[in-house]
Amino acid sequence: MSCRNEEDLSFRDFRHYPSKRRKEILNDPEQLKIMIRKTMKESRYLHSLSVAETAAKLAEKHHVDQKKAYTAGLLHDVTKDLPIEEQDEYLRYFDPEKLEYPDKVKHSFSAVYYLKDMCNFHDKDILHAIYNHTICTSHDKLSIILYIADKREPLRGVDDGLLELAYTDLYKAYDLLTEEVREYLERRGTDDRIIESRI
């Protein structure tokens, strides 16, 4: 069921909606799209749609829940365009050790607490995948699928064969991408303790 009034949909007001309405929205990708579009710039919104579609295709290939993969893709960057100070508020309260992490990766952690706080969203599989989508140490398939989809969705324009490999050998693609992320963090001078604790 789609929303009759798009103006009614907002993460900021979500916690005040009746529980039945919240459940309806969280189970309707079209309504989620309306909400995430309000939280991010257009390019990020288009990226999120592309990640969702790529994740759903990978999920189908690897016998993972496609709806969860699509929803994780839609929501994975929900806090990326929030001010870093606002993201840090969530981390300071819920996950203070992540305050040491580079600003570019904090959104993967803050998104989890934002979704719990704003939406009473508690799907553990999706939240776990979102938490791991920038620097992934989880070996569950949904997390790996989102991790790869985020970094190789078609709009990124990276044509190195890794996404194609992921359709046939998910874990090999994960290993290659993890090495790439390690090298990226090292080039940016990220604290070795952070790199080793996550990868």
Image (cartoon, grey):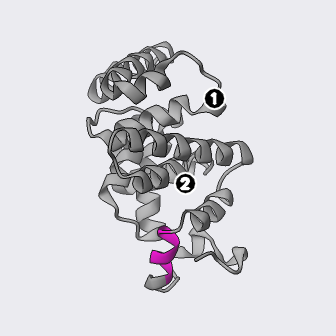
Q: Which of 94 and 148 is in front in this view?
A: 148
Give the residue drawn at x 40%, y 66%. Answer: 121
Q: Which residue is painted at 37% across and 53% down in the image?
A: 127
Residue that mark 1 sits on: 156
Q: Is mark 2 on a helix, strand or loop?
A: helix
Labelled disc at residue 86:
2
- Residue type at mark 1 is Arg
- Residue 14, image x and y in percent? 54, 75
Using a 10 Å C-alpha cutoff, classify the residue at mark 2 as few (fewer than 14 neighbours), some (14 to 19) or many (20 or more).
few
> Where's the C terminus, which quadrant?
top left
Q: Give the range drawn in magenta.
A: 21-27
Q: Does residue 15 appear in the picture of this structure?
A: no
Residues under labels 2 and 1: Cα distance? Answer: 27 Å
Answer with the quarter of the image where residue 166 lies: top left
Q: Is residue 155 above or below residue 178?
A: below
Q: What quarter of the picture does the N terminus occupy?
A: bottom right
Image check: 25 left or right of 155?
A: left
